[in-house]
Image: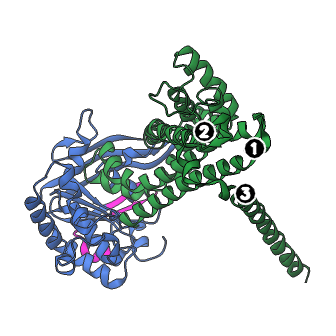
Amino acid sequence: MEVKIKVENLNFYYGPTQALFEVDMEIPACQVTALIGPSGCGKSTFLRTLNRMNDIIENTRQQGRVIIDGRDIYKNGIDVVGLRKTVGMVFQKSNPFPKSIFENVCYGPRIHGTRDRQVLAEIAENSLVRANLWDEVKDRLEASALALSGGQQQRLCIARALAINPDIILMDEPASALDPRSTAKVEDLIGELRKKYTIVIVTHNMQQAARVSDFTGFFYEGRLIEFGRTQKIFTQPDQKQTENYITGRFG
Amino acid sequence: MKSRWSEKWIYWVFRITTYFIILTISWIIFDIVIKGLPVISWEFLFAAPREGGTKGGIFPAIVGTLCLVLGTILIALPLGMLSAVYLSEYAKPGRFTRAIRLAIVTLAGVPSIVFGLFGLGLFVIFFNFGTSILAGILTLACMILPTIIVSSEESLRAVPLGLREGSLALGATKWQTIYKNVLPYSVSGMLTGSILGVGRVAGETAPILLTVAAFFLPKLPGSIFDQVMVLPYHLYILATQHHEMDLVRPLQYGTALVLIALVLGINIFAIFLRSHFRKKYKW
């Protein structure tokens, strides 16, 4: 199986506090990889190292390598803007911009230089269709994104990420603030997106990880304890800690 | 039982304090309106003063004050907004940034007469602008800058981090993020706070006393290097320096009324601006 993201010996620090310890991981292409673990175990920090979102936090540093498509994204002179175009991100708290639905989806393409209204309209429709949102919003593209429901807002954020045509989509607990029906919709969507995109999803919800992912990594106290096929992790994990967490004995 | 009693007591303390403040302000405004309204006429508003200020109007002073207010906004607003963007978005937290912040807060507390002396020394004498509109505007701009920076920074900070992250994650640069996804939502707060601050400029006397104000100049300014009459200084002269006190007493109240109306007008404009932007970008 093709490896999309290769993480080698990654250490990460917030000031003097080390948050990640010697993480090695090979994330396969066009699969869904779930990251699970108790709060504060470093899974979100790890996710944010994959598109260098941690750069914007003061006083952080990392050691080790993150290689995407054969290039180390932490090497000097790497184009962070280009990187984030390839690696899209959806946040835990849906963050639609206080603009129209159309302008939200077109934000990325506009930033990257698309001006033609016709082209933008096509991108918007395409992205919203792929995010399973088109039928619900096609008649009110000019309405404010903030008028949408929580679940719709999160799918809009996914559509916005799709609009810049990334290869990889990072999702940080995308359904944690959603009701069960909206969650099911987002999960269905993840299932469809896997055909085309490499997806890495952080989740607190183990049923969710079991439902949507092909591979699972279990983090505990900043270390990657175990990584493997979801089916194996959830049925016969190698590590005792993994088993304890999955069976609900701690965390 | 005791706690319930003190609850009542505290409630009345707050209530009476508030009433007292409202009463004082109403009294002042009522007094000025009652005594000032009779002098307000077409001639008073749109004619130059005659016969040493005992007759005629205050048009040059109104124009002078408007010139100063507009000029101050024009200079202080962009400067203040740009430094607020720098401080809130770009400056790395550290000793240097802390020192800048401290300097700004200190500057906001400097008495206005000190700004007047500073303006006299730097703009009037050193830069040789003379006693002029330009010198006055620059002095007032220095005085109002801290207010503008602080209020602008606050409205920039009010924009949630999630919006910045969302934009950066789409591959926007820092400046694109600020320009397209932070400034549009904070500009209303920046403008409102700043203009409320500028309202204060209209009423300041000390800084303009030394840099721009003319004692008696019954014509309109021709350029930014001219002196002008201004409302607060005119009021000061009518109230304390005039040789025919009884003759100009009603004119004092009229001038005060016009000044208050002007400041109120500026504030209402700021409020209107805020509601306009709020409608445009609803959270």
Q: Residue at x 37, y 44 (%)?
A: A55
Q: Chain of mark 3?
A: B
Residue type, numbered disc 3: Lys
Q: Is residue B209 above or below residue B6?
A: above
Tags 1 and 3 touching, CB below 8 Å: no
Q: Chain of mark 2?
A: B
Q: In which quadrant is the N terminus of chain A drawn?
A: bottom left
Q: Is residue B74 above or below residue A144?
A: above
* Image coordinates for residue A3, horizontal then vertical, percent: 16, 54
Q: Nearer the viewer, mark 3 or mark 2?
A: 2
Q: Say which colour chain B has.
A: green
In the depicted view, which residue is nearer to us: A26 or A83? A83
Which chain did the image draw in blue? A
Q: In the image, which disc is placed on residue B35?
A: 3
- Chain part drawn in magenta: A208-226
Q: Residue at x 25, y 76 (%)?
A: A187
Residue behind mark 1: B247
Residue type, numbered disc 1: Leu
Q: Earlier in the sequence, mark 3 or mark 2?
A: 3
Q: Is residue A222 magenta?
A: yes
In the depicted view, which residue is nearer to us: A220 or B165? B165
Circle 1 residues within 10 Å: few <14, some 14–19, many ≥20: some
Residue behind mark 2: B49
Question: Judging from the image, what secondary structure is the residue with disc 1 in?
Answer: helix
